[in-house]
């Protein structure tokens, strides 16, 4: 019996630049790590590559001017209702800069007390203090300033309304803010609407069918503008700041990359590994209440072997119930036998209670994101072994 289950390694690579051959860099880095760390390549090992370096290597960038042009082409009258953007200096600020550059006036509708991914715009306790029901109450900008204007984000120390106002005004664009959790509130101000939420944008758009002009952020830069990068499926969703005038977009050609890496590894090791591109992990910070997932999906590209979700038994449940009278080697053997003979679909059975039957790509992508981090670890590739093993292997 092996004494180690899943093993996760952050793999260091050279700094990835535009137009680099990422498949060659990734496979070489893994094979170099194999030699230096003395581990073997096995079938069903998983290679995870962060979307950041994928977007960089495929040169998937766009400028603020590119965004402004797309906005001008889609919103002719210049007054745009920007609905439910997340509160992020990295994720939305540069998008907003481009929107403002392409508009004459922005009415920004913010959800409260939090944005979609958990960033607060005000202190939730103050809602009780002022007897405000967030389900039906609309807070004007004037009222926000009077009652909540001193609020600063727990991590950044910034008031995001002040921050966003400054961006818009610097682009010579008029701005007003409204706080409401009903997207239809925006139609009291303008019927030209840009829906900016990430995971609920289709629901929000459906509620705004009465708008004269209606787009979502996924429809901005969903095709090239003057030779720019683009993302045909997600547009500006998943983009982040590169410079003060340029964004890196969510990768467009990751399918080609994962297939190429898988093919090279087969040629060099004769092993069938799985490969995925990952972005933000899907987990929530318990202190700040921030849900990490600011990308539209955890994994936009992956090989077919990563489809599906776990079908696992809860060992604790088996030990405490069916095999409560056993211990030691007898208990181990009974549980191994139970695992080997388990149903191919355990959904709904008590034997699975407490397991996490999310999609493989969401679980593995979250594991990879936590391993690589978002700062200076220098490990944009994560190598995972033994993920599909269980106690009976």
Image (spheres, rainbow, N blue to C red):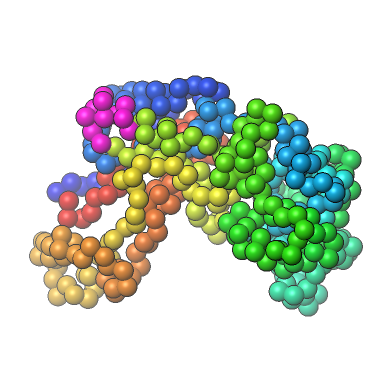
Q: Position of residue 336 (x, y in %)?
A: 15, 60
Residue 265 position (above or below residue 295): above
Q: Is residue 352 magenta?
A: no
Q: Residue at x 51, y 50 (%)?
A: 297
The percent coordinates of residue 372 (x first, y second) are: 47, 39
Residue at 76% from the left image edge and 70% from the top image edge: 126
Image coordinates of residue 214 in percent, x first then y, are 72, 55
Q: Which one is in front, 270 or 286? A: 270
- The x, y position of residue 2, in whole percent, is 18, 46
Q: Work out whether residue 151 or residue 279 is closer to the camera in this orientation and state it.
A: 279
The magenta-colored residue range is 262-272
| Residue at the spot 75% in from the left edge and 61% down from the top edge | 211
Residue 191 seen in this snapshot: yes
Determine if residue 150 is in view.
Answer: no
Q: Report the front residue among 67 and 223.
A: 223
Residue plotted at (74% across, 65% down): 210
The quarter of the picture where residue 138 lies is bottom right
Relative to 233, is 362 on the left or the right?
Answer: left
* Residue 270 position (above or below residue 70): above
């Amino acid at each position: 019996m092996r004494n180690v289950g899943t093993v996760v390694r952050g793999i260091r690579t050279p700094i990835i630049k535009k137009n680099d051959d990422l498949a060659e860099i990734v496979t070489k880095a893994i094979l170099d790590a194999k030699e230096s760390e003395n581990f073997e390549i096995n079938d069903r090992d998983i290679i995870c590559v962060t979307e950041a370096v994928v977007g960089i290597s495929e040169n998937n960038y766009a400028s603020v001017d590119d965004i402004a042009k797309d906005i001008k082409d889609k919103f002719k009258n210049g007054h745009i209702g920007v609905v439910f953007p997340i509160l992020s200096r990295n994720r939305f600020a540069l998008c907003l800069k481009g929107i403002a550059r392409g508009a004459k006036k922005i009415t920004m509708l913010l959800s409260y007390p939090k944005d979609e991914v958990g960033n607060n715009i005000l202190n939730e306790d103050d809602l009780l203090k002022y007897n405000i029901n967030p389900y039906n109450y609309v807070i004007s900008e004037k009222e926000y300033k009077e009652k909540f204007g001193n609020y600063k984000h727990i991590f950044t120390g910034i008031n995001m309304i002040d921050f966003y106002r400054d961006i818009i005004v610097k682009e010579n664009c008029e701005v007003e803010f409204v706080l409401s959790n009903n997207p239809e509130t925006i139609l009291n101000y303008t019927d030209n609407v840009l829906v900016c939420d990430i995971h609920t944008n289709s629901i929000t758009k459906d509620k705004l069918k009465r708008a004269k002009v209606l787009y979502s952020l996924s429809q901005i830069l969903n095709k090239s503008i003057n030779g720019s990068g683009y993302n045909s499926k997600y547009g500006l969703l998943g983009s982040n700041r590169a410079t003060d005038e340029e964004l890196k977009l969510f990768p467009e050609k990751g399918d080609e990359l994962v297939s190429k890496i898988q093919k090279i590894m087969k040629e060099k090791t004769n092993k069938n590994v799985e490969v995925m591109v990952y972005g933000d992990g899907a987990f929530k910070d318990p202190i700040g209440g921030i849900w990490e997932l600011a990308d539209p999906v955890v994994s936009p590209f992956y090989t077919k072997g990563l489809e599906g979700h776990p079908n696992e038994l809860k060992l604790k449940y088996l030990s405490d119930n069916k095999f409560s009278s056993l211990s030691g080697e007898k208990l181990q053997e009974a549980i191994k036998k139970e695992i080997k003979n388990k149903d191919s679909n355990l959904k709904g059975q008590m034997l699975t209670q407490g397991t996490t039957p999310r999609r493989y790509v969401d679980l593995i992508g979250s594991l990879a994101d936590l391993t690589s981090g978002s700062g200076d670890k220098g490990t944009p590739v994560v190598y995972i072994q033994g993920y599909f093993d269980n106690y009976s292997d």
